[in-house]
């Protein structure tokens, strides 16, 4: 008989917001599939969760590798037969980090690298897991975006994010938001809801120690969106329960 427990797969779940999301969803009784770039990192993270009485399984998932994406989907299909929650969390910053404003000097390599991880891989992973999400009574996709991808706020003089113009990263998150809108529309007749989360400025390796939020609070938006009910948002850009402008 299939288990009543929900199953969540989180990419980049070995550290930062991804690991904390895994912990908080696990504490709510959800089975966690820990995606990480290496088997060792996935296993170490899963072991930590298991030590906290969370049901967790490691999978090797370099999001940029087709063979990893296919093997991860095969694992979930064979083990659970369904997927309830897909958290597209893995992401990278541009060269010099989130605060390093540069546009014309952005290299082709930086653009390709950042878009490969932050956009193209998300499209591919979502495509891979969609058949399993469709088997869930209430599939949820959460894309880890960023307020830095908001065109409205980037273009608004005096907005707090206006000086933060790391082009490759910001553009990749703008494009990711477009995926959220398009996919939510395409799936609107199904039980699946797709949303973009802005976690806040969070103290992680990417966010740096200058950030405002502790990781425990930085995971809240993702966890909320992973657990929304049938009346919850679809195709929205959310931070701590409030809608952000695209
Ligand atoms: N921190 C913030 O202030 C902030 C703000 C807005 C949005 N976000 C978004 O939130 C998400 C999580 O960020 P974070 O702050 O937790 O960053 P982080 O601490 O730097 O962690 C990033 C995670 O992504 C993983 N990752 C990177 N490339 C990968 C790949 N090719 N395959 C698999 N995993 C990969 C990393 O794995 P490794 O350990 O192998 O490198 C790590 O687990 C990102 O999408 C980020 O853009 C963060």
Image: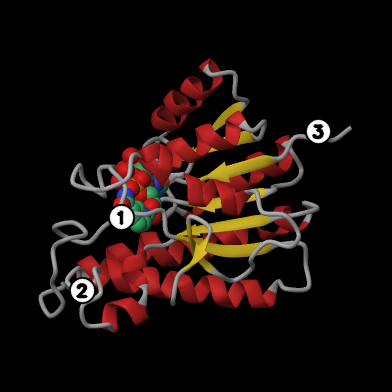
Coordinates of residue 55 in the picture (x, y in percent): 63, 25
Q: Residue furthest left?
A: 105
Q: Secondary structure at mark 3?
A: loop
The earlier-in-sequence mark between 2 and 1 is: 1
Residue 58 position (above or below residue 180): above
What residue is disc 1 on? Answer: 92
Q: Secondary structure at mark 1?
A: loop
Residue at 36%, 66% in the rendered image: 147
User: Quarter holding the C terminus?
Assistant: bottom left
Q: Residues within 10 Å of mark 1 (few under 14, many from 20)?
A: some
Judge by depth and name the residue closer to the eye, 202 or 95: 202
What residue is disc 3 on? Answer: 3
Q: Confirm if mark 3 falls within 8 A of ligand 1.
A: no
User: Quarter holding the N terminus?
Assistant: top right
Note whether residue 214 is visible. Answer: yes
**Mark 2 or mark 3, whichever is nearer to me:** 3
Q: Confirm if mark 1 falls within 8 A of ligand 1.
A: yes
Q: Are marks 2 and 3 in contact (CB under 8 Å)?
A: no
Mark 1 → mark 3, Cα distance in angstroms? 35 Å
What residue is disc 2 on? Answer: 108
Residue 50, quarter of picture: top right
């Amino acid at each position: 008989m299939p288990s009543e427990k929900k199953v969540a797969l989180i990419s980049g779940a070995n550290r930062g917001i991804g690991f904390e999301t895994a912990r908080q969803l696990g504490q709510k009784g959800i089975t966690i599939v820990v995606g990480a770039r290496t088997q060792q990192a996935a296993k170490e993270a899963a072991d930590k969760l298991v030590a906290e009485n969370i049901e967790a399984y490691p999978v090797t998932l370099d999001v940029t590798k087709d063979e990893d994406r296919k093997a991860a989907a095969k694992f979930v299909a064979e083990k659970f037969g369904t997927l309830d929650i897909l958290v597209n969390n893995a992401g990278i910053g541009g060269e010099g980090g989130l605060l390093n404003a540069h546009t014309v000097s952005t290299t082709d390599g930086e653009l390709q690298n950042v878009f490969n991880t932050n956009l193209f891989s998300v499209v591919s992973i979502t495509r891979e897991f969609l058949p399993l999400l469709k088997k869930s009574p209430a599939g949820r996709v959460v894309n880890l975006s960023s307020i830095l991808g908001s065109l409205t706020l980037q273009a608004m003089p005096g907005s707090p994010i206006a000086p933060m113009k790391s082009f490759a990263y910001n553009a990749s998150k703008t494009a990711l938001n477009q995926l959220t809108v398009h996919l939510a529309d395409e799936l609107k007749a199904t039980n699946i809801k797709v949303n973009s989360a802005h976690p806040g400025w969070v103290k992680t390796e990417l966010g740096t120690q200058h950030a405002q939020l502790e990781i425990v609070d930085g995971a809240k938006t993702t966890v909320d969106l992973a657990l929304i009910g049938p009346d919850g948002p679809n195709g929205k850009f959310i931070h701590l329960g409030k809608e952000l402008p695209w």
